[in-house]
Amino acid sequence: MFKELDPILHSQLRLAVMSLLIGVKEAEFTFIREKTNSTAGNLSVQIQKLRDAGYVDVTKQFKDNYPLTTCKITKKGINAFEDYVKALQQYLQVKK
């Protein structure tokens, strides 16, 4: 009856990252860290898990001699996020 929730997206921080990225073209690591109120280390690990799943693309470069990491949601990530939201809606629509 219930569709299984994607374990990659079922983490609070990874879901927050995807929620931020779904509405923008791309976002800098520092922006995501500030919005999610996470540590750089934890966020880095969670973004790597999203990257490994193919849900986000990560670009690392330098801007004015400072490292700049940018994240962008992929088509696969968009589809996974939409499926996750639909699955959650099914859980919420169960009648007692």
Image (cartoon, grey):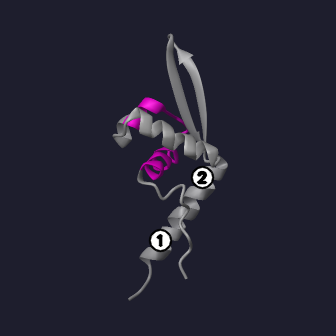
Residue 23 forms part of the magenta stretch: yes
Residue under the image location 48 percent in, 49 percent down: 14
Total marks shown come to 2
Residue at the (36%, 35%) spot, across then down:
34
Which of the numbered marks, if any, corresponds to residue 89?
1
Q: Crowding at label 1, few (<14), some or many (≥20) Cα neighbours within 10 Å? A: few
* Residue 80 image point, x, y percent: 60, 57
Does 27 appear above or below 15? Answer: above
Image quadrant for the C terminus? bottom left
Q: Residue furthest left?
A: 37
What is the secondary structure assignment of the residue under circle 1? helix
Q: Position of residue 74 (x, y in %)?
A: 63, 45
* Residue at figure coordinates x 58%, y 25% from the top left: 60
Quadrant showing the N terminus: bottom right
Point out which mark residue 8 bears: none
Outermost residue to the bottom: 96
Give the main secondary structure of the magenta stretch.
helix
Residue 10 falls within the magenta-colored stretch? no
Location of residue 94 with respect to 35 vertically, above or below = below
Contact check, label 1 and label 2, Cβ < 8 Å: no
Q: Residue 9, percent across and down?
A: 51, 56
* Label 1 to label 2: alpha-carbon separation: 17 Å
| Local SS, label 2 | helix
Disc on the earlier residue, 1 or 2: 2
Could you tell me the amino acid type at mark 2?
A: Ile
Q: Residues within 10 Å of mark 2 (few under 14, many from 20)?
A: some
To which quarter of the image does residue 95 belong? Answer: bottom left
Question: What's drawn in magenta, residue-wise?
Answer: 13-33
Look at label 1 and name its amino acid.
Gln
In the picture as drawn, the residue positioned furthest to the top comes out as 65
Which residue position holds label 2? 78
Residue 53 placed where, x, y %? Answer: 63, 49
